[in-house]
Image (spheres, rainbow, N blue to C red):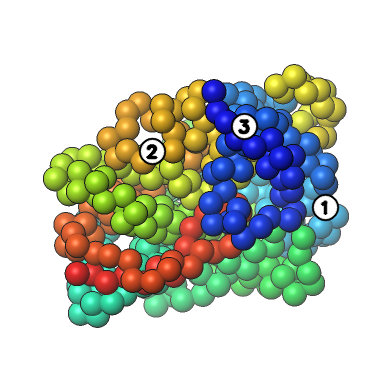
Amino acid sequence: METAPAELAEAFDLARLTPDFYDDPYPTYQALRTHQPVKRLAGGGYFLTRYEDLVAVYKNTALFSSDKKREFAPKYGDSLLFEHHTTSLVFNDPPSHTRVRRLIMGALTPRAIAGMEPELIALVDRLLDAMADKGRVDLIEDFAAAIPIEVIGNLLGVPHHERAPLREWSLAILGALEPVIGADTFNRGNEAVGEFLGYLDTLIARRAAAPGDPERDVLTRLIQGEAGGEKLSSKELLHNCIFLLNAGHETTTNLIGNGLVTLAANPDQKQRLLAEPALIKTAVEEILRYESSNQLGNRITTAEVEIGGVTMPANTSLTLCIGAANRDPAQFADPDRFDVARSPNRHLAFASGPHQCAGMALARLEGAIALSRFLARFPDYALDGVPRRGGRVRFRGYLNVPCRLG
Ligand code: HEM
């Protein structure tokens, strides 16, 4: 049985989080799981923290919708931002979700992912060389953030000299998803979608004129569709390319950054991984569980439903706390212990059910290669100052991590 202060659960307000919470949200999550696992939020809706409840919600797309058209209409009006977010795979329900997902998963073939490995290794090694020359580095800017940008660019075959604006566009488009946004954020997000669409039009026209191997080239496969003739519409293709480019950026940066910080804070586990490099796969899973890069998900009820003894009407918004579910003692033995060999480890960092992360094989590959090669090269690395967090509740990660390489 967990013991945690009931007052912490009672006082929890998602709209007014404290610096202590951003620093370490897990005591609050434990309090919520113990005392108010289906917590009514001040602004309406419920905040769920139990593993079992999250799995039940993720599995049932009929009762728990991902469709955001109703929610986004007043926020974005008739704009490109509205068109983008409501066309993205992640914000749709079956049957349109099922069809688009099948086409996207068909393009992210194991061969396409495996084919990216040599370039990924070369990229990581180039970054390690550049860091070795510096000695004192920022683990985020010099390493963790530099990897996904290149990988995602490679995924769709964006030429290197055309990659510069991708990060800005991605930040502006995802920034517009914050619960409350001003005119500036809205305008920047909208402009970014417009510029991104303009760029992709050109990229897609070039690839359609000179296609690659559809088994290896993700964009060619997305353009051509399936052998049976099933294809993405041009609107679906454009917006889901933007989504793919955005979905893998910050999440994967956080996996790598959180991994290096957590290993530095747990020297026994770092030593164990150094002694047994084959543990890298379970270590990556444990980092995803212990410090989940993406801590929150959202769904809306489509009918009256009961969760954990609480009855709620249709159109109730739910916040699914992945960070809390991944520390639930009903699912994970000794959940606050970081254990690079943990097994089984059925964490929810990539969610579960029909919307489970479509890029998880790529994210796992990036995490394993980045972390194992970093450790082999700089086994004595040590943090050099206090890491600076991103200050966001949905994406848990760092903006800067000063480090000495030893
Ligand atoms: C550590 C890195 C990553 C984490 C933690 C992560 C996490 C997630 C989560 C939790 C979801 C489910 C969202 C929901 O339905 O509520 C999701 C969906 C998705 N992710 Fe990832 N992701 C990561 C990397 C990537 C990468 C690298 C890509 C692209 C190559 C990607 C593409 C997608 C797509 C397309 C979806 C939508 C799937 C659907 O709705 O059917 N992700 N991701």
Q: Quadrant of residue 64?
A: top right
Q: How far is disc 3 from disc 1 in space, using C-alphas?
A: 33 Å
**Is residue 182 found left or right of 139 in the rendered image?**
right
Local secondary structure at mark 1: helix
Are there few (<14), some (14-19), or many (20+) residues within 10 Å of tag 1? some
Picture coordinates of residue 348, whole percent (x, y): 49, 35
Q: CA distance from mark 1 to mark 2?
A: 43 Å
Horizontal side of residue 298 vs 167, given as left or right: right
Residue at the image position 72 percent from the left and 70 percent from the top: 185
Q: Secondary structure at mark 3?
A: helix
Tag 2 residue? 337
Callout 1, which amino acid? Ala
Mark number, residue 33: 3
Q: Nearer the viewer, mark 1 or mark 2?
A: 2
Q: Amino acid at mark 2?
A: Arg
Q: Is residue 20 above or below residue 100?
A: below
Quadrant including the N terminus? top right
Label 2: how many Cα within 10 Å (few below 14, some 14–19, many 20+): few
Q: Residue at x 78, y 42 (%)?
A: 41
Q: CA distance from mark 3 to mark 2?
A: 17 Å
Q: Which residue position holds label 1?
A: 73
